[in-house]
Amino acid sequence: FALNASSAKCVRAAPASRRSAVAVRAGKYDEELIKTANTIASKGRGILAMDESNATCGKRLDSIGVENTEENRRAYRELLLTTPGLGEYISGAILFEETLYQSTKDGKTFVDVMGEQGIVPGIKVDKGLVPLVNSNGESWCMGLDGLDKRCAEYYKAGARFSKWRSVISIPAGPSIIAQRDCAYGLARYAAIAQSAGLCPIVEPEVMLDGDQDIDQALEAAQNIWAETFKYMADNKVMFEGILLKPAMVTPGADCPHKAGPEKVAEYTLKMLKRRVPPAVPGIMFLSGGQSELESTLNLNAMNQSPNPWHVSFSYARALQNTVLKTWQGKAENTEAAQAALIRRAMANSAAQKGEYDPSKESASASEGMYEKGYVY
């Protein structure tokens, strides 16, 4: 068989070789990032979120009649971090920038205080939410400019993990641009944080605002997590060196059909199993305005059977609400306030292991803490 002349013109010799454009990722902090993530995601322990901005912390202090001054903020944060035995139940604490550089009244840095308890220092690195132009009244999160330099400085100061909170609103859509900005911003942040040695907590919060039912909440959560992981993969984020901080899948705050712990657990785990690779070490839930009791019951329900990841907590209000009310800004109440923090930490530690018993809870633990449009 022979090719005729016209056929021969169509034959092209294959190149002898082609250069590959595959890049292999090997960051200098990879081993440390994995170690940090797994230290935080350790059995029976979770995160104390105490990274409220000075303005939000001021609202908390105002609720108990305490003036919002740097010294009062420092005194309250010292109360939290010096609680005896806290490290048995808390593996990491997220700090606001001011707190990272503060010290106890006796001059010991908060970073050193945390180290003595085996608590990993974390840092809030985003610059907050602002209106998103041409959207449905939605927000976007600022802070990527200069983030690499800030992360490097925070690492030098002793921080080993970071947090960036962005949000989506179901009543507002969410719009395509809001969802995309949320997901891509989180991915860029995570890549930058890892390059500076900080294990990033990734938090695309599905807000509780609205009257959506639990099925609508599930769809929104699945969508934002799918897009977030897609962009994290594009940005070569190492999944073994991150932690997630999702909202639990629950009906909206104004939905007339509430869901019990078993249903919340069912829907939340369904969403996670559909979207989160098992390479991720830990899922550290936000409380999102749930009561202290509700957030603990829901966490406990999710730990009744084995999960591919460490399923735990990263609570702020759900750990601190009773603490603040007990303290009242008075030094003589410090011991009682610290005892209240330990009780909540112990309860959530037990829930992380699926062993929580709510029978000993006080009535105040069931008080709701939802705030529409909540900001840090």
Image: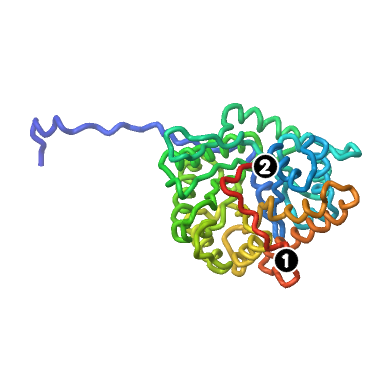
Residue at position x 51%, y 56% from top?
A: 252
The residue carrying pointer 1 sits among few (fewer than 14), some (14 to 19) or many (20 or more) residues within 10 Å by Cα, namely few
Foreground pick, 53 / 126: 53
Q: Between 198 and 357, which is closer to the camera in this rendering?
A: 357
**Would you say 338 lies left or right of 348 here?**
right
Res 289 visible:
yes
Name the element at disc 2: strand
Residue 263: x percent and y percent? 53, 67
Mark 2 or mark 1, earlier in chain: 2
Residue 369 falls left or right of residue 115: left
Disc 1: which residue: 363
Residue matched to label 2: 161
Which of these two is toward me, 302 or 252? 252
At label 2, the amino acid type is Phe
* Distance CA(mark 2)–CA(mark 1): 35 Å
Q: Disc 2 or disc 1, which is closer to the eye?
A: 1
- Looking at the rendered structure, the secondary structure element under dot 1 is helix
Type of the residue with mark 1? Ala
Contact flag, marks 2 and 1 (Cβ < 8 Å): no
Q: Position of residue 35 (x, y in %)?
A: 68, 47
Quadrant where the C terminus sits is: top right
The correct choice, above or below, for 356 with respect to 165 in the image is below
